[in-house]
Image (cartoon, grey):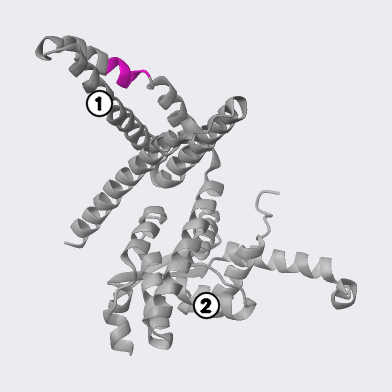
Amino acid sequence: MAGRDFLGEFEHLVVLALLRLEDRAYGVTVRQEIEFRTKREVSIGAVYATLDRLERKGYVKSRCGDPTPERGGRSKRFFRITAKGAMAVNRTQQALHNMSAGLELARSSS
Amino acid sequence: MTTKAHSVQPPRIATWLVNLFATEDESMVGDLHEEFAQVGSRSGIGVARNWYWRQSLKTIADLVGGGFRSAPWSTLGATTTGFLLLRAAHWLPDKLLNVVTERYLMYWSNHFQAYLWLLNALFPAFLLTSLFTGCVVALIAKKREMIATMALGIVLCAMILFGYLSALAQTGDFNFLWNMPWAFSDPIAIILGGMVVRQFRLHAANLSVAKNEE
């Protein structure tokens, strides 16, 4: 299955957040985007652990921004999805779609 | 309110703890600072401090889990090496102190003083051995110093607890439990060794960043 990897659940959420945020995607915005849309408390550590893993797989790339005073003089690290990452998210979306097609999820869970 | 929130620093101990587990990249701590300022502006400093502590502890838990998952074998290797080293070096403090005592026995006025010296020096000597082991484990584990030393510390704590509980079950005597807290000093010294190496590594990384900026 090499090169045909699917994204894990949290990896999927993080990549979708990167796609939504485009060039504004860094730790704070990614964390807040996931928290806002999923209503689930997420730690910045979980976001970075996932982004580092995705970067090692070649699914995302990062670059450093400028340091700002409200960050204690520390710089931001902006992330963007690569072509390989886009393929992985499409594959995962397709797999989820195929698995859920024809299922009436609301009725079957009741 | 915004100015006030910016001027108030987030809890330093929480930041220090996150830095022990985070990568050398400073952006994660910067993100925590930025959100602390945002929460402080919105809801006040008290809420922001609570938020910061909660986020820091969750972040540490996630970094420990993520760090172990990303390199399980090297972390396990460092932990096992530390365990074997600790077992192999366990006789060392005893032996060294015996050598010192025998060599300098003539300077003691009587044997009782020599015995007292041995008794007092043995505990720090064992602590130093554990501290040294912690440093070795941290050096082997590279950027996962705290994860490897904590794993070794937890294994030792579990062994100590098991030892005490089985002794208690066999004898039914609670009297020896008074020295139980001292038994945990070895795992604590190992974790301290990890902290020392981590701090040195962070300091070296900061120095190299400062040099590059010049």
B92 is within the stretch colored magenta: yes
For the C terminus of chain B, the quadrant is: bottom left
Location of mark 2 (residue):
A32
Question: Mark 2 Cα within 10 Å, few/some/many (few <14, many 20+)?
Answer: some
Residue at point 19%, 12% (across, down): B111
Q: Which residues are magenta?
A: B91-96
Location of mark 1 (residue):
B121
Taking the image as shown, residue A74 lies to the left or right of residue B59, namely left
For the N terminus of chain B, the quadrant is: bottom left
x, y percentage for residue B67?
A: 50, 50
Seen from the viewer's position, the closer of residues B72 and A92 is: B72
Seen from the viewer's position, the closer of residues A68 and B194 is: B194
Residue at point 49%, 38% (across, down): B157
Residue at point 47%, 30% (across, down): B176
Q: Is residue B113 above or below residue B62?
A: above
Given the image, on which type of amino acid does mark 2 rest?
Answer: Gln
Q: Is residue A107 visible?
A: yes
Q: Is residue B177 above or below residue A17?
A: above
Seen from the viewer's position, the closer of residues B121 and A80 is: B121
Given the image, on which type of amino acid does mark 1 rest?
Answer: Ala
Q: Nearer the viewer, mark 1 or mark 2?
A: 1
Q: Which mark is residue B138?
A: none
x, y percentage for residue B145?
A: 40, 44
x, y percentage for residue B98?
A: 26, 14
x, y percentage for residue B122?
A: 29, 25
Residue at point 33%, 61% (across, down): B13
Taking the image as shown, residue B125 lies to the left or right of residue B56, namely left
Q: Chain of mark 2?
A: A
The outermost residue toward the bottom is B1
Q: Secondary structure at mark 1?
A: helix
Q: Are marks 1 and 2 on the same chain?
A: no
